[in-house]
Amino acid sequence: MYSILLVDDEQYIRQSIIELVQWEKKGFFILGEASNGEEALEIMSKNVPDILITDIRMPVMNGIELTKRIREKHPSVKIVFLSGHDDFDYAVSGIKLNIIEYLLKPISIKDLEKMLDQVREILIEEKREANDLKRIETNYLENFQGIKMSFLVSLITDNYKEVPEEEIQKLVETYRLNLTGNRNVLLNVNIDKSTLNKSQLENHNLEMMKFSLANVTRKISSKYLGGEVFNFTSNIVVMLSDTKENIDLYKDIIVREISETIKKLFHFSVGIGVSEEYNSLSDARLSFQSSISALNYGMLMKRNKEVYISDIETSGLEKMVFDESNETKLISLIKIASKEELLEFIDELFQGLEKDNETHLQIFLMELYVSVLKAYKSVIPIYDTTMLQRIQMISDIHYYQEIEEIRDWFKEFCLTVVDSIHLQRKKKTDSLAKKSYDYLVNNYNDPALSLKLVSKKMAISPSYFSSLFKKENGISFTNALIKIRMDKAKEHLLTTDSKIIEVALASGYTDQHYFSYCFKKYFGESPNKIRESFKEKELLV
């Protein structure tokens, strides 16, 4: 329904027009009526009509002056003049004021209704064009999203090292990206296809799942931290950006919640590669590549879980990054000590090599050799004597007579590095397991003691620390803490006259009732009962 304001100084004309026209049938309603221009402006100060039907000759303020005033403030209002045969000069003025129709007095209702039909069509067409503009705007926003996505992809694939940070930030502002934190970390989420059922493996379903997967991941990450989530190739990339404190507080929670939520909602598993933290967005490419390395490690280990690059790499972001996929695979195989797959892959690398191209062979061997040394250095910062001897031999490798001899030498070299890395990791994990257990023994009375707190002390992620602790100590972190606290509590209970609440506090419990519940569950008897039984035995002795 379109609104009409009727302005004429003769009331009977206004009344006749209002009564004789079937306004609703034509798609209109009377918003109001006025006897001159000033009254009309007063009404329009509160409600602006779609159409103004006004007489030209009126006292106080005529139709021409009224139209001029309306055109200044409300140029979209459609104006129809009511005029007599003698108003030719006024009609000329009306043309300049973009009047859409003239109705001659005495007014014919038929002409008036015909005019209303024409004006309604004009209004409908304008609305249609307005909708077209909305579609244009939608197209623009879609294109904007495409440009935004293109920039995000370029951040993780192109080299922005030479681009000033302020220029990158300008682009972030232009594309309205939520990447304004001073600390960043990148997650790479990949579907474990071995856990998909038959219907999920169909291409159209898989693509829809990736879209839905990104939405779920975005919803989870946005609850805790700033950042952007987008699909890239077959993965979901999560760029988290916030303060260092918030990143440290919520990163592990986000990783775990994504993994668990996806398993519950979609009934399949995902691998999540977690990069090192970085300050500048120009390091996003290196971060992305390190998250890929973490994912590769997880797949080769058949973990299909959350893999933090810091758990398998200690030398820093750039030292973990390699551009060629075969180099990345070689490094991963060496680091996870997968000897059988490593030897098979080396055979693949050497297939088709010819000794005739001496320069190409030297470069090829040097690239492989340097990659292996980087893998070694990432775990063992200082070369031992055996490794130093091997390094000195590199210049003589290409003098071997046959490619097979060079390949076998390289295999032996890689296996030596694998054994060295494995031994170093065993020492490191043994040391971490012992240090963490000792930490529990020395700090069991701290009520705030938790897996996350201790893993932070050990500088590794909670999930990795949890599996490491159980593997090396033969007991889970939670059970170990309970055992230590209960044994200490019992010792305290039997060797002192401290009150139960004091024993509880000394054992890391702030609530006496909860402590008594845990104590009875662990030993089968309450603290008081065990103390009484112990004293009775002493008396008998």
Image: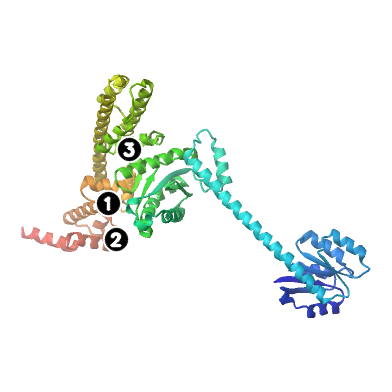
Looking at the image, can residue 361 be seen?
Answer: yes
Instruction: Identify the mark nearer the N-term, 1 or 2.
Output: 1
Measured in 3D between alpha carbons, the distance from the residue under mark 1 to the one under mark 2, in whole angstroms, is 13 Å
- Position of 179 with respect to 434 (left or right) is right
| Residue topped by disc 3 | 332
Please name the residue shown 29% across and 32% down the image. Answer: 347
Mark 3 vs mark 1: in front: 3
Amino acid on which the number 3 mark rests in the picture = Ser
At numbered mark 2, what does the secondary structure look like: helix, strand or loop? loop
Please name the residue shown 38% across and 24% down the image. Answer: 360
Instruction: Identify the mark nearer the N-term, 3 or 1.
Output: 3
| Residue topped by disc 1 | 445
Asked whether disc 2 touches disc 3, contact meaning CB atoms under 8 Å apart, the reply is: no
**Image coordinates for residue 277, horizontal then vertical, percent:** 42, 42
Judging depth in this view, the residue of 259 and 242 nearest the camera is: 259
At numbered mark 1, what does the secondary structure look like: helix, strand or loop? loop
Amino acid on which the number 1 mark rests in the picture = Asn
**Image coordinates for residue 457, horizontal then vertical, percent:** 33, 44
Asked whether disc 3 touches disc 1, contact meaning CB atoms under 8 Å apart, the reply is: no
| Residue topped by disc 2 | 511
Measured in 3D between alpha carbons, the distance from the residue under mark 3 to the one under mark 1, in whole angstroms, is 41 Å
Instruction: Identify the mark nearer the N-term, 2 or 3.
Output: 3
Measured in 3D between alpha carbons, the distance from the residue under mark 2 to the one under mark 3, in whole angstroms, is 48 Å
- Position of 473 with respect to 121 (left or right) is left
- Position of 450 with respect to 47 (left or right) is left
Judging depth in this view, the residue of 506 and 20 nearest the camera is: 20
